[in-house]
Structure formats: structure tokens, C-alpha cells
Amino acid sequence: MLFLFSGEGPTDLGTCTSGTDFCEGEAFLHGPMAVMVDQIVEGKHNYSLLDANCYRYVPKKTLTDRASELKAITKKSLNLPGKKRGKETRYFYNNARVLARIAMEWEAEQKETVVAILFRDSDGTASAGRGIWLDKYNSMLNGFSEEGFLRGVPMLPKPKSEAWILCAVKNAYQGCEALEDRSGNDNSRNSLKEELTRHLENAPSRESLSQLVRDGKVNINQIRMPSFKILRDRLEGVIK
């Protein structure tokens, strides 16, 4: 089983060390969200996908560039509530479609099953135009489904990945649901990112956040947050 990652930056799933369309092995610097995925997989199958190098990372720019392919395809109605779709909902949907295509290309190349994990923060600085969390999550599922790809996993923290980390370092895993109701806007007063910086006494980096998860200081088995549970349930269901 192979794993295809695509995220937004170094402090979520990770980053490539080069400007190529994808990277793997030593060219991929994994972030804390990749470590979380690795631990979920290891909990089910007793091996580390990161240690085994059975992964590939696709930068966000690659998805953006390849999304232009979708413009040449006849538009089809989405399986979303109602017929209207906002710009941001289409963004999540198209990202999932493109990642599904890349995953199926890799499957054909390797003749092996691929699981695709698409990370996106659900609420950033453009929150006013982003609709609700469930619409975004379902749009990603629908994007995978539109391509006939059944092993797509949306990784959609509410409102962003800092909330999952703060659940451990601030709340000691208690009452973490309230973090999901916070603004994801980094420019907001007392933003999640600023609060995480205060608790860590340093600006969070890819390396420091990854180490927190690896060391168990952020324990995925104790995070009781709806958006994290949905991720875990979906991933475990896909890899069973």
C-alpha cells in the first residue's frame, strides 16, 4: 500500500526540498500531520509508512497547475446540497479530483494500491467566503468520487491544524471541542497560531511540531475532537 500526500505547507504534511511536481524519500521533509497519519497507519498495520518510504508528496502548486485540466471537461453537477456551489467549495472539489487522478496514475505505474490524503485548513484568512466545514469536507469526498477513486481521505482540521496541537499543549486534551469554534484567521485577535506560539514559547516550526507528535507530547490517541475523529475513522476505514 502506497500513500500520496498533498498539503498546504511545511507545518502540516510537509514540504519538498526541490521544485519538482512531486517528491519522495529524502527529498520530502515530513510535517506533524504526516506523522499523525503515520501513527494511525502503524496502529492498524504495525509498520511506519514514513520509515518504509512508501509515500509520495505532491505540492499544492502541482495541484493548482493541473487543475487547469478540469476546464476542458464537460461540467457535471456536483453531489452537494443544492445546485449552487461557491468558489471555495469548487476549490476543495477540484483539488480532490486532481489528487485522485495523480493517485490513479501512480497506481497504474506501480501496480499497487494508493491511498491519497488531501490536507487543507478549513478556515483561513478568506473565511468570509468559505462556507461551512461539512460542505468543504463533502466537496472533497465528491471530488474523489467523481474520478472513481475510493481511497481518498480529506484531512480537514477545524478550523486549522493548530487547533489539534493546542488540544494537547494547552488543554491537556480536555474540552478541545471549543477550539473548533475559534476563528482560523491568522490576523484575528488571539489567533490560534499566536496562541500556539505562546504555549510553545517559540514560533512553531515543521521540525518542532513533528517532534511533539513523534515524542507523544501530542498524543493522537487522546485527541477527542470531531474533525480529528472524522479523519481517523475515514483513514482507518480506507486502510483496513
Image (cartoon, rainbow, N blue to C red):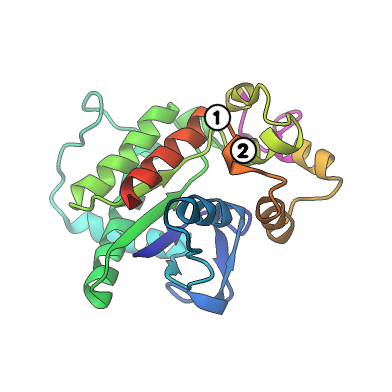
Gap in angstroms between the C-alphas marked 2 and 1? 8 Å
Amino acid carrying label 1: it is: Met
- For mark 1, what is the residue? 225
In the figure, 56 relative to 163: above or below?
below
Q: Position of residue 56 (x, y in %)?
A: 43, 69
* Main secondary structure along the magenta-highlighted residues: loop
In the foreground, 101 or 70? 101
Q: Residue furthest front?
A: 46
Q: Residue furthest right?
A: 201
Q: Is residue 187 visible?
A: no
Q: Position of residue 188 (x, y in %)?
A: 70, 30
Callout 1: 10 Å neighbours few (<14), some, many (20+)? Answer: many
The stretch in magenta equals 182-193
Residue at 57% from the left image edge and 61% from the top image edge? 14
Q: Which mark is residue 1?
A: none
Q: Is residue 114 left or right of residue 184?
A: left
In the foreground, 50 or 150? 50
Kindly indicate the quadrant of the structure image that contains residue 110.
bottom left
Q: Is residue 107 magenta?
A: no
- For mark 2, what is the residue? 164
Query: Looking at the figure, which quarter contains the N terminus?
Result: bottom left
Q: Position of residue 62 (x, y in %)?
A: 41, 65
In the figure, 116 relative to 156: above or below?
below
Amino acid carrying label 2: it is: Trp
Instruction: Kindly state the secondary structure of the residue where label 1 is placed.
Output: loop
